[in-house]
Amino acid sequence: MPIDASTLENLLKGTFNNAKITITDLKGDNDHWSVEIVSEDFIGKSRIQSHKMVYGSLQGKMGNEIHAMQLKTSTPNS
Amino acid sequence: MTNDNENIFATIQEQLKSDDIVLYMKGNAKFPQCGFSAATVDVLNSFGVNFKEHNILLDPELRQGIKDFSQWPTIPQLYVKEEFVGGCDIIREMAESGELEELFKEKKLISNQ
């Protein structure tokens, strides 16, 4: 079952409280997302570590309720 | 680890030892079955590197096993010399930034020219 944008946003905000989060529904079906997160939490982390933090914040939904998610993480001023 | 995990992890470790560049994907390189897998194949082809793909759609145990092994929830997954490099988004970013070329050169998978 897909997920809606505000649920997705709340999950991400739960972990990344000071971040700039941009969520786009790529196909208008609540199932193909593009997410960009700019956060200090990623400072010093590799891309894999950063992405794993994001997947972790989704509490197991990645691959289940969330079918596809393009993810871009970056730090402020990068 | 359960016995099931031990078996599939052993299989995966063998696969990673057998080839320098290993891609776990949906479909195969000629006929990818998902946009993200196709995009990753395109990136690898743009470097002209040899790679071994494993079609996880043909093997449910591998499909779940590789996610447990890598602690990564999605497919495709790219390994270079037994090290997990990332999924489609990371591979594309690294290709754009030049990091992927650096990695391939460092691992002697493409020439230094």
Image: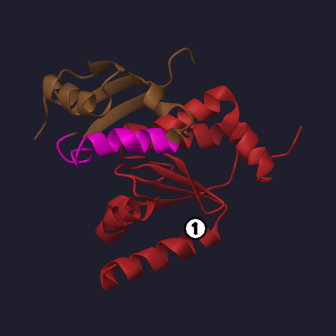
Q: Is residue B38 visible?
A: no
Q: Which residue lies at the image location 65% right of the left edge and 27% below the top edge?
A: B97
- Residue B5 x, y percent position in the rendering: 35, 77
Chain letter, colour red in render: B
**Residue that sits furthest to the top in the current view:** A77
> Which quadrant would residue A39 be assigned to in this image?
top left
- Magenta region includes residue A56: yes
Q: Mark 1 packing: few (<14 Cα in 10 Å), some, or many (20+)?
A: many
| Chain of the residue under the numbered disc 1 shown in the image | B
Q: Bounds of the magenta span?
A: A48-65
In the picture shown, does residue B50 fall above or below B90? below
A18 left or right, relative to A75: left
Q: Quadrant of the C terminus of chain A?
A: top right
A77 left or right, relative to B59: right
Q: Which residue lies at the image location 49% right of the left edge and 25% below the top edge?
A: A74
Q: Quadrant of the N terminus of chain A?
A: top left
In the picture shown, does residue B17 fall above or below B45? below
- Residue B51 x, y percent position in the rendering: 62, 56
Q: Is residue B35 visible?
A: yes
Q: Secondary structure at mark 1?
A: helix
- Residue A5 x, y percent position in the rendering: 17, 24
Amino acid carrying mark 1 in the image:
Leu
Q: Which residue lies at the image location 55% right of the left edge and 76% below the top edge?
A: B14
Chain A tint in image: brown
Q: Nearer the viewer, residue B27 or B6?
A: B6
B93 left or right, relative to B112: left
Q: Nearer the viewer, residue A47 or A18?
A: A18
Q: Which residue is tagged 1?
A: B16
